[in-house]
Amino acid sequence: MEIEMIKRRSEVVKLMRQWFENQGFLEMLTPRLLGLPGQEPYLEPFWTEVVDADGKPYPAALITSPEYSMKRLLAAGFDRIYDLGPCFRNNEPWDGTHDPEFLMVEWYRREAGVNELMDDTEKMMRWVASQMTNPKFKFQDSGFRRLTVEQAWHEYAGVELAPLLGDREAMAKLAVEKFSQTVNPDDNWDDIYFKIFLSQIEEKLGLEQPTFLYRYPASQAALARRSADDQRWAERVELYVGPFELANGFAELCDPIEQRQRFLEEKALRSKQGRRSWLLDERFLADLPKMGNAAGIAFGVERLVMLLAGTTSINDILPFPARERFNPLPEKTAE
């Protein structure tokens, strides 16, 4: 256990809360245990059971993020809100960058889009770094880079992505012939996209300067609204700094009909993958239209701590990392 590293984690959490309070954000303490978690096909909740006083059981899951609750609070009339607390994801690799329980801060604001999210994120990170005791990482005076997905594919892979959108056969041909990727018969367009993106583009993002990647193919932004000028794209943004992907945000979709269809598609994909699926959150869908023009972003707190503390392992900044919590020492026999 590295005491100074763990102190840095506490320091960053304190500074982040201070920044949000200074900006007029109200902290929300949303539930960590829900009956209906998110339907994301590539995230796996931890499931348990809640039993009431009469002995009736209810399925329950730990949240993978506070997103649904935060959006319902926007719909109820709140503005400029944040939630900083633990989130939980099962089936994650214990590779030094993940832990099944981790700290996430999500913030939301009305009358905002991805540009405001990028502004907030950069200002928060710069301020925290400026107030932190002896940070090991310093941000350059030049601003964070802002790059569309289309620009990234052109710059790092030499590919014009727009003509390939939705064309599974053309994307498969590109993957095999240009990038020597293996394409399976059941790979869909997004599967092939990610084979190229992960091998050719993602590892290059954020190495020279922090980089926001935004304006994603619509198929990869299930909770984001489509771009007004071109419905093939969606208003999603991610942030890359050095070896870390730190944030993922959206200009929020508030159309319940389109959102229902996206949820059904995700639910079908989960079933196809052999994963558990569950009912749609009808309360969430009913509240969506009241959310209005809003944007929100999820930010990995420990990733920022790791960056500023100068370590690439989350195990260095956690008091009790997963490899210790779930690998007990053998019991000693009585002498």
Image (spheres, rainbow, N blue to C red):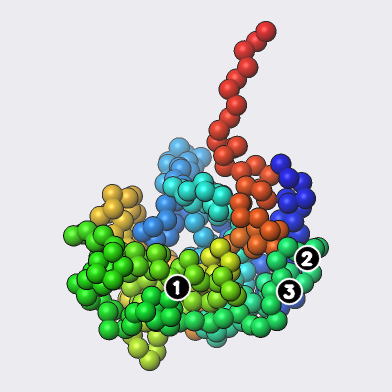
Front residue of 77/119: it is: 119
Q: Answer above or below: position of 137 versus 322.
A: below
Residue wearing tag 3 = 127
Q: Secondary structure at mark 1?
A: helix
Q: Amino acid at mark 3?
A: Trp
Q: In the image, is residue 254 above or below residue 27?
A: below
Question: Distance from label 1 to label 3 (Cα)?
Answer: 34 Å
What is the secondary structure assignment of the residue under circle 3?
Answer: helix
Residue 260 visible in this rendered orientation of the protein: no
Which residue is denoted by mark 2 in the rendering? Answer: 132
Q: Residue at x 35, y 77 (%)?
A: 218
Crowd band around label 1 with a 10 angstrom C-alpha radius: few (<14), some (14–19), many (20+):
some
What x and y, as percent, mark residue 151?
43, 83
Residue at 45 percent of width and 73 percent of height:
287
Front: mark 1 or 2: 2
Tell me the tag on residue 287. Answer: 1
Residue 80 horizontal side relative to residue 270, left or right = right
Quick one: SS at disc 2? loop
The reply to whether residue 175 is in sight is: yes
Please state which of residues 14 and 281 is positioned toward the viewer in this rendering: 14
In the figure, residue 192 lies in which quadrant?
A: bottom left
Q: Residue sitting at 62 percent across and 72 percent down?
A: 81
Spatial CA span between label 3 and label 2: 9 Å
Dividing the picture into quadrants, the one containing residue 153 is bottom left
Residue in the picture at 31% in, 67% down: 179
How far across and down, in percent of the image, does residue 155 sit? 43, 80
For badge 1, the amino acid type reads: Asp
